Image (cartoon, grey):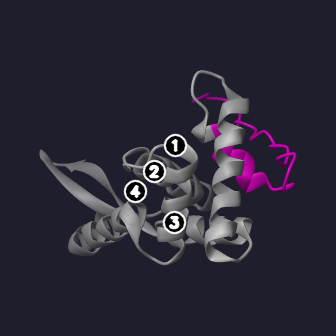
Amino acid sequence: MPRRKRVVKRQLLPDPKYHNVLATRFINSLMKQGKKSVAEVAFYRAVDLVSERSGEDGMEIFQKAVENVKPMVMVRSRRVGGATYQVPVEVRHDERTARSIRWLIRFARERSERTMAEKLANEFLAASKGEGGAVRQREDTHRMAEANRAFAHYRF
């Protein structure tokens, strides 16, 4: 982190198929070893599978899934006088989106389906209904913050 200047956030270009910046962020997070075309194929197939299975627009379900997984609060470790407290803090908007994308990808990779597209599609459908591993992760994070609300005055 620089000491003098603020870091300027680069603007992402929207993805070529849906012209959506959120889709670009998801594809970039999904990508491994610089293989963007592989990540794009998996994401687009997943969105197509979602629209086939649900009968609704796949991108809307994807956006709803990301929205359902976004955490509002989380805990940060804060050391005060030799003791470490888990202090609940509010999550910045861009950090919320980043965490929800990361959780969706992580829990999709842990699923047992054959292809990544199927795993993503099922995770999107589950998250859009308020179910699945990524939503459970958000609820655990919120529960942890609620349990440590007594230490909120140590916020930094």
Q: Nearer the viewer, mark 4 or mark 2?
A: 2
Mark 2 lies on residue: 108
Q: Report the amino acid beneath label 4.
A: Phe
Mark 4 lies on residue: 156
Mark 3 lies on residue: 70
Q: Residue at x 74, y 72 (%)?
A: 57
Q: Nearer the viewer, mark 4 or mark 3?
A: 3
Residue 13 magenta-drawn?
yes
Task: Identify the secondary structure beneath mark 4.
Answer: loop
Q: Nearer the viewer, residue 23 or 123?
A: 123
The reply, left or right, for residue 77 in relation to residue 30 is left
Of callouts 4 and 2, the N-terminal one: 2
Asked if the residue at tag 2 contacts the one at tag 4, i.e. Cβ–Cβ closer than 8 Å, the answer is no
Instruction: Tell me the CA gap for discs 1 and 4.
Output: 43 Å
State which quadrant residue 96 falls in.
bottom right
Can you tell which mark lies on residue 115? Answer: 1
Q: Nearer the viewer, mark 3 or mark 2?
A: 2
Coordinates of residue 123 in the picture (x, y in percent):
48, 60
Q: Nearer the viewer, mark 1 or mark 4?
A: 1
Q: Residue at x 74, y 41 (%)?
A: 9
Residue range highlighted in magenta? 1-28
